Amino acid sequence: MRSALELFTRNGYDHTTVDEIADAVDVSQRTFFRYFANKEEVAFAAQDVAESHFFAALVDRPADEAPLAALHGAVLDAWDTIGEAVAQLVPQDLHLRMYCVIESTPALLAEHLRRTAELEERLAREIARREGLDIDTDPRPRLVVAAFGGVVRVAGRLWGERQGTSMESLRGLTAFHLDHVGAALAERWDR
Amino acid sequence: MRSALELFTRNGYDHTTVDEIADAVDVSQRTFFRYFANKEEVAFAAQDVAESHFFAALVDRPADEAPLAALHGAVLDAWDTIGEAVAQLVPQDLHLRMYCVIESTPALLAEHLRRTAELEERLAREIARREGLDIDTDPRPRLVVAAFGGVVRVAGRLWGERQGTSMESLRGLTAFHLDHVGAALAERWDR
DNA sequence: GAGGCTAGTGTCAGTCACTGACAATTGACA
DNA sequence: TGTCAATTGTCAGTGACTGACACTAGCCTC
């Protein structure tokens, strides 16, 4: 995994072949595909940790908190602890650089968005559970999560385009955008 | 394009080879790839029309309308006219069935979300233009569009899972979800 | 009317992601 | 020592995609 991420961040995802990854750790290509379903999967190994951390953070939020507030709190909590959790798998900076590769590689960005959509479905079900609602009849759980997820995406994307890519700056950028979504959805915008 | 969509909807996207598409219209595989950059592109030909229709609908909205109201109005306007516009390319029901294939095929869903993200960037720039704002300094254009886009996605996804898949039901479902997003983002939910 | 230019197409060989079948290796355990 | 299971390698094949090259048909020019 580390070898793959290093190759991806150094040479780009598209210019890295599975054979190169396999050779870097002296196994056959066939063995690579026994551990990873496809080339994309290895690229998202660190993301996986971050996503499940976020979900866990939502579950840990106090039960009496309102849905949007719980999501808001969970994403900020998660950014605090994701760094250490991921660091046990891959070096911190490798993870951050890989995030930029994902954002700038069309095939990976597409897959990233699909995985995010899956995560959002899980989040919506958790919100429905917290509120004691049936997700198939009440649209609100999916709607908060969808609106919320869109905002977090904007933060992540802008962060990826920046120079100073640190965990703290991402947390700050996310908080900033969440704080301004109310004004953005307001009926009239002031200058 | 029609042949491809028919094969995709009949046999599934993954179980349709480019050779089969090419053979169906008596051209070589090489010729297929001269008209479509890849196998995915042909699957989105009808979506392309729908998306540019939606963008055009936003541009046509009265200049004094508030951002969220303009997006809201544009999506409902667009659903009214997309049907006819697409029908000039492919039969209506083929387009609708293809939408379901996209939603249920992971590779296509991923690409669809990526294309939607691209469209949202264009929408955000148009909102910024309408409001006379600089999109690089003011986060609000991207934030409304992101929140709005998330909600429309939920409608589209649920519609794809339904049985009665008509253009009107999609329009109705979209309107329904947009009408309830306010309540979903409210501080407290009532039962 | 010959020659040349262009657009559209086919063929072929090659790369890369991925898969199924089968054989070889190793370590644990009876 | 024989056996079993887990891990790996090899090999052949499929399918998406690309680059190079040749062929054809229509059209323009001299």
Image (cartoon, coloured by chain):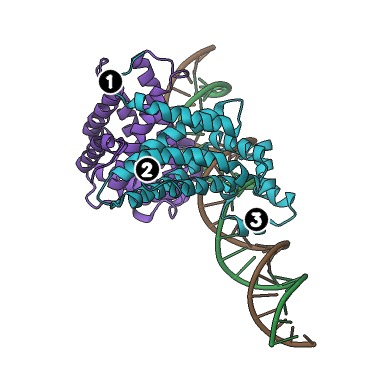
Chain colours: A cyan, B purple, C green, D brown
Is disc 3 placed on a helix, strand or loop? Answer: helix
How far from the left and from the top, in percent, is residue B56?
31, 24
Task: Tell me the number on the disc at residue A178.
Answer: none
- Going by the numbered disc 3, the residue's amino acid type is Phe
The subunit letter for the residue under badge 2 reads: A
- Sort mark 3 into few (<14), some (14-19) or many (20+) by Cα contacts within 10 Å: many
- Sort mark 1 into few (<14), some (14-19) or many (20+) by Cα contacts within 10 Å: some
Residue B168 appears in which quarter of the rendering? top left
- Going by the numbered disc 1, the residue's amino acid type is Ala
Question: Quick check: marks 1 and 2 in contact, CB under 8 Å?
Answer: no
Asked whether, in this view, residue A12 is left or right of residue B108, the answer is right
How far from the left and from the top, in percent, is residue B49?
33, 32
Residue designated by label 2: A65
The subunit letter for the residue under badge 1 reads: B
Is disc 2 placed on a helix, strand or loop? Answer: loop
Residue visible at 60% across and 41% down in the picture: A83
- Sort mark 2 into few (<14), some (14-19) or many (20+) by Cα contacts within 10 Å: some
Q: Is residue B153 above or below residue B75?
A: below
Instruction: Tell if the residue under mark 3 belongs to the same chain as the one under mark 2.
Output: yes
Residue A12 appears in which quarter of the rendering? top right
CA–CA distance in space, label 1 to label 2: 31 Å
Residue visible at 26% across and 20% down in the picture: B61
Q: Nearer the viewer, mark 3 or mark 1?
A: 1
- Give B173 or B77, whichever is nearer the viewer: B173
Residue designated by label 3: A32
Question: What is the tally of numbered marks visible in this picture?
Answer: 3
